Image (tube, helix red, strand yellow):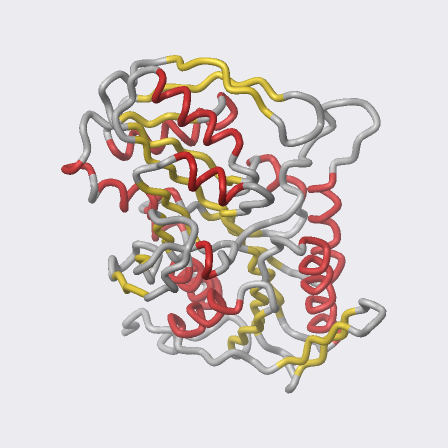
Amino acid sequence: MSTGRLHDVAPMYGGIRLIGGTSTPDLTQEISDYLKVSLSGRDIIQFPNENIFVRLHSSARGQDVYVIQTTSKPVNYNLMELLITLQTLKLDSAARVTAVIPYLCYSRSDKKDQPRVPITARLVADMIECAGAHRYITIDLHAGQIQGFFSIPGDVLTAYHMVSDYFATKLPQMTDPVIVTADFGFAKKGRNFAAKLNAPMAFVEKRRIGNDSTAEAMSVIGDVDGKDVIIVDDEVDTAGTVCEAAQIVRAHGAREVYLSFVHPVLSGPAFERLQAANFKEIVTTNTIPIPAENKLPNMTILSVAGLLGEANTIPIPAENKLPNMTILSVAGLLGEVIKRAHEGRSVGEMFNE
């Protein structure tokens, strides 16, 4: 009788192998610890001409291999490193290769919304498949239709279960919480978040200007007066939109303002804007690594993605810029999905689906 442990169920393929790229070493090690499977050795070298070289320390022939690599900045380097690693495993005759990509780059380029522009998300999907991936695992794509760009099967996970579970523990401390989305494009996911917390919704009307990241927040649709607000989004890049949203809801009488998002892209002036915005708390995940100098002292990390509910406190240097950031680790979420995929068990059962 199976106990649900990794080695108690006969795998569909050979032994499991974990190979980490260079983009997110801490998360990769957490996944390794969760699965109790050591990381496989590899050499990843960038030559003076910026060409990337990958060499495995041992054969992956006939094995079930999971390559863990987020494609945050430097985006093009991390993407090429992933592709080259996938091809290395393909040529080494791995039985199955799964690309584990916590954050998928170019996901905003998902359609031709004006003449003479590419659909780069489709190109990235094609390259991942061509390089040798048999499957993919990722978290919270910017647009659901990107799943249709892949011809290989995959698991598109969401971190909203763990994030909403975290906020559920804070509800007793909050006053009439309201879920606010920074634009209408995120309304459906925001509604799911609100339903989980049994909270009402409001919306910030926003108009985007041109092809850059500039956006103008206009007004609030809904009631936030005298209430605590949780602004939710899938990713924050330069933080202009969410910080404008915070200003707007405060102008409409919001009490305390929280910010929740999955992918901490945090480019350019993001840290300075978030610091100045005076959020009560900023809650995000480690799909993209955040430099230690930008985290808060005694940062709280939920170490297994809310699945087990355990928390660890990690000391961070005192000279940090963000005094109020909580990072929820997706290691347990990804580790559990890897285990279930390896054993041929349902992933949907994790979420009662």
Rendered view: 326 above or below 4 = above
Tell me residue 108's x, y (percent): 63, 36
Tell me residue 206's x, y (percent): 53, 19
| Residue found at the far bottom of this picture | 58
Rendered view: 190 above or below 351 = above
Image quarter in which the N terminus is found: bottom left
Tell me residue 344's x, y (percent): 46, 63
**Residue found 25% across the figure and 33% down from its top:** 197
**Relative to 25, 261 lies left or right:** left
**Residue found 60% across the figure and 49% down from its top:** 104
Rendered image quadrant of residue 202: top left
Image quarter in which the C terminus is found: top left
**Relative to 333, 12 lies left or right:** right
Which residue is nearer to you in this view: 320 or 1?
A: 320
**Relative to 208, 16 lies left or right:** left
Tell me residue 51's x, y (percent): 81, 68
Which residue is nearer to you in this view: 42 or 58?
A: 42
Rendered view: 95 above or below 295 = below
**Residue found 44% across the figure and 68% down from its top:** 31
**Residue found 56% across the figure and 80% down from its top:** 40
Which residue is nearer to you in this view: 206 or 32?
A: 206
